[in-house]
Amino acid sequence: MEVPRYWRLQKQRYALVGEICPHCQVKIFPPRDVCPECGGEAKQPFSFSGKGTVFSFTTMYDAPKGFEMNTPYTVALVKLEEGPVVTAQLTDLGEQPVEIGMPVEMVTRRIREDEEDKGIIVYGYKFRPVMAGTH
Amino acid sequence: MEVPRYWRLQKQRYALVGEICPHCQVKIFPPRDVCPECGGEAKQPFSFSGKGTVFSFTTMYDAPKGFEMNTPYTVALVKLEEGPVVTAQLTDLGEQPVEIGMPVEMVTRRIREDEEDKGIIVYGYKFRPVMAGTH
Amino acid sequence: MCDVVIAGIGQVPVGEHWGVPLRTLAARAMLAAQRDAGGLKPQALYVGNLLSPVVSHQSNLGTLLADNAGMSGIEAFTVEAAEASGAGALRAGYLAVLSGYVDVAMVVGVEKFTDAVGPVIEGAMSETMDYDFEATNGLTPTAAAAMVMRLYMQTYDLPSDGLAGFPVLAHENALNNPNAYFRRALTREGYARAAMLSTPLNLYDKAPYADGAAAVILTRPDRLKKALEHPLVQVRGSGAAIDTLALHDRHDPLAFHAAVVAIQNACRHAGILPADVQVFELSDNFSVYAALCLEAGGFAQRGAGWKLANGDELSLKGRLPVCTMGGMKARGNPAGASGVYQVVEACLQLRGEAGANQVRDARRALTLCLGGPASTAVCHVLQTWQ
Amino acid sequence: MCDVVIAGIGQVPVGEHWGVPLRTLAARAMLAAQRDAGGLKPQALYVGNLLSPVVSHQSNLGTLLADNAGMSGIEAFTVEAAEASGAGALRAGYLAVLSGYVDVAMVVGVEKFTDAVGPVIEGAMSETMDYDFEATNGLTPTAAAAMVMRLYMQTYDLPSDGLAGFPVLAHENALNNPNAYFRRALTREGYARAAMLSTPLNLYDKAPYADGAAAVILTRPDRLKKALEHPLVQVRGSGAAIDTLALHDRHDPLAFHAAVVAIQNACRHAGILPADVQVFELSDNFSVYAALCLEAGGFAQRGAGWKLANGDELSLKGRLPVCTMGGMKARGNPAGASGVYQVVEACLQLRGEAGANQVRDARRALTLCLGGPASTAVCHVLQTWQ
Ligand SMILES: [Zn+2]
Ligand SMILES: [Zn+2]
């Protein structure tokens, strides 16, 4: 990941900051220039709780450049409790089998290998199973 | 330069091997699938002598990725004595000013830096001034 | 509107052409199409390509390919629409001829994977998704398809080999296609034993990426100075649509909405219903996508597309033959070229030149090419011209 | 053939938009064009872009940009033709509306350089040339222009500041353009002192690469439900042509043959001569290319194009105003978006909305956009519609 993109995406990646539409109140992540529900344009920042459930998932054995050292790893569609679905890796799975509907919560983790460019280590959101007893 | 491209271009790059059109006898470099003179398709390999003259040139102070360590360097359009014009770096210039019309000859030199990928060092054709007295 | 016909077709065998540069791969298909069209010279070249800027470090393919093939002075540009690039280029060519501005247009789809290897390829293919919010989290097109497949299998309660029928059929049909990458049979047992690429998607659920080039020449019938030795195929309808780029933005990831719209638009334009075709070249780049293409076309109810592949309905002698020359799965998937391969293969069927794989009485065909999980869809209706 | 008009235009200021993602840059221009067209909704989006797959790792911009801007379900793809990508996208959109198939098409040119830096950018731009036989020898578009410039200066015996008139004029015209990257004057003395980039080409002979996005909406006049507050501009002619990709394959590198053909085709289609226009937006991405564009259009004899910039002929009050809002040199050169900026600026002139830079009685304009050293050329004739 190049330096400009790294800084540009920092807020979304670290804190799951999306948007709320002032016209129809829908919550949006990732950010968009036009609200997909009402077509309105102006939006306000909104911090998601980071709680959600697994909507679908896959464990990958072939990785693209930058992720080769991590295989196999599990990627999921996570439905946030506020509505939007996000794409993210699952982490801290231990022995637990993943299932659709499993509750998960966001954590910040190292996302990918150092790239050719600049020695940047990319951190961002992943999701881990919600521990029994923590809720 | 990636490994497959490196091998694919090896013949052209080391020995200035182009083609001769069996239909109209025009000599072609770099290789093409259709003869630009007569539209014929099949062609035979042809080794160029490597002698030519400078048709135009420029000394570059900004370099693309892979060439940063070489700046400034001089690139020229070299008109080969067999007819075609090729793009190539000039080398071994010493104190001599480059001029349009200057006779040059091909030599094999290291072309660019090691790339991100594979540690390949790319060699290929460059041209140097023809020494006084060598002709 | 005038009639637009395909006067010539050309293709190269799909495979690993390590020693052949992209320009030469394309030239072989282009020159074959030109010969097939009786030497007709194009005024325009529309190139379908996805990967060249990243994998071959080469952009401006329009100029490179036209120049290299001896077509200097014509108009040329590249169309990119992810894996639907070739179909998008065909649509651009079709509209150009339809506009009356261009009399003869060549469309070439070309993809060269073997200028790079392994993770670079998966990375380059991942650029078709939302790079900032999908690819940077490690998602690839294969993983996206796997998540769609898991949802499909769980929602509709499929057995673990429920989608096996698609690759088995594709491999069967490729046996007689000299341009296919894989000319060997696949059994259900072979499918069941295959290694996982991205759970629950296995090696045979994914069409293999490979090098390839295919071309067609489009014109108006009145532009043909002499009769050709083969029948003409008319482009009767064309439709294209997009959905959200990211899978996570879909309300219903199992509804290939863009495919529905593209098929409807193409069929409405042609004045037909999808059921009025005898051949359907669909996107089987992932086996679950083949099922969803069938559902998008209304050939099966939602959740029932997979069942069609478990009978004879989709085979060459069935009610709706699909992937008649091996599909992307067994002919091979040269990404941005696949949409043009589909059209070339449909032409072979409509011209009666499909050899052992000839579908009887094939007069009309539907081609549907997807980019991503139907993030983009391009559909064409082709029929024998008279 | 029906009339095709530009119902709306939009642009963002050219510059370094480090914090703005490509999709947002494009959305700002797209939504501005849509507002300008009275809210008209496009059925198709044609994107002109060159660098995104390499610099931003993002392909399938058609889907991304349409989706992000709330246009899901429409048709969309990207057109790439090197630095002429935006002009190529306009041509694709024009032909689509002309075909009768698409009623309302949006064309957006967008380029984001600031997702990468320095040598990566020069490398990415070099992919527009023959990568195997130009770029791998260290050539860049700047170096190619420098070799053309040296040939031109030597062949026609120019003084060392013979081409200074072009950047000086461009900087003068940009002073009143709020969307220009550089709004400061340049003197001949400043030109003479400038650092060499690639001999004999100096800093001011090259238009600076920068981020930008510009958009237009094309439709048929009968599709406009209500009158707009501004005049309509008609696309009256369009032409495109390629030359050899590599400079070394040209018999005469100083004849911009593709530009000649593109201009001829566009003007023939419009039923005009090049001399019948009041504004000429040409490619001044390198100052010598501006001279060669003038010669390609027949506005000057071969070898005399540079002299036009040394008088008043090309200024806003002259016989043939060029680069009226600053050209690529001073407005900035967002590569694949430049062709759309040219058209937006020509529309401002034809609509009488060019403010202090208004060309009197501008009724017809020519836009000419080059990819490489006229390896690709795309030309449009625009005129006030009535
Ligand atoms: Zn809203
Ligand atoms: Zn010949």
Image: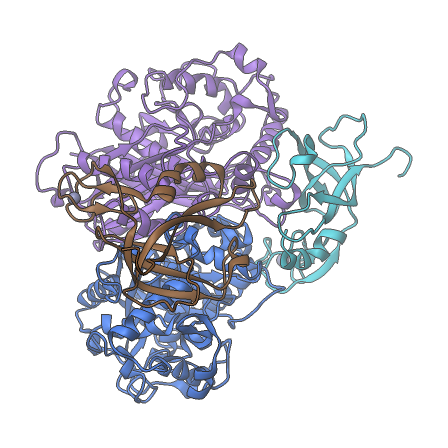
Chain colours: A brown, B cyan, C blue, D purple
Q: Quadrant of residue D226?
A: top left
- Out of D48 and C38, give the one closest to the viewer: D48
The image position of residue D3, as x and y in percent, is: 20, 43
Rendered residue at 24%/34% (across/down) = D9
Q: Is residue A117 above or below residue C208?
A: above
The image position of residue C274, as x and y in percent, is: 21, 74
- Out of D21 and D130, give the one closest to the viewer: D21
Q: Tell me if D119 is positioned left or right of D340 in this view.
A: right
- Out of B101 and D47, give the one closest to the viewer: D47
Q: How many marks?
A: 0
Q: Tell me if D308 is positioned left or right of C380 in this view.
A: right
Q: Is residue C211 above or below residue A81?
A: below
The image position of residue D318, as x and y in percent, is: 36, 16
Q: Tell me if C63 is positioned left or right of C4 in this view.
A: right
Rendered residue at 44%/56% (across/down) = C138
Q: Can you see residue C353?
A: no
Q: Quadrant of the C terminus of chain D?
A: top left
Q: Residue furthest right?
A: B133
Q: Residue furthest front?
A: A133
Q: Quadrant of residue C255?
A: bottom left
Q: Can you see residue A116?
A: yes
Q: Tell me if B76 is positioned left or right of C97 in this view.
A: right
Which image quadrant shows ligand 1? top left
The image position of residue D380, as x and y in percent, is: 33, 38
Q: Is residue A83 above or below residue A62?
A: above
Q: Quadrant of residue D222?
A: top left
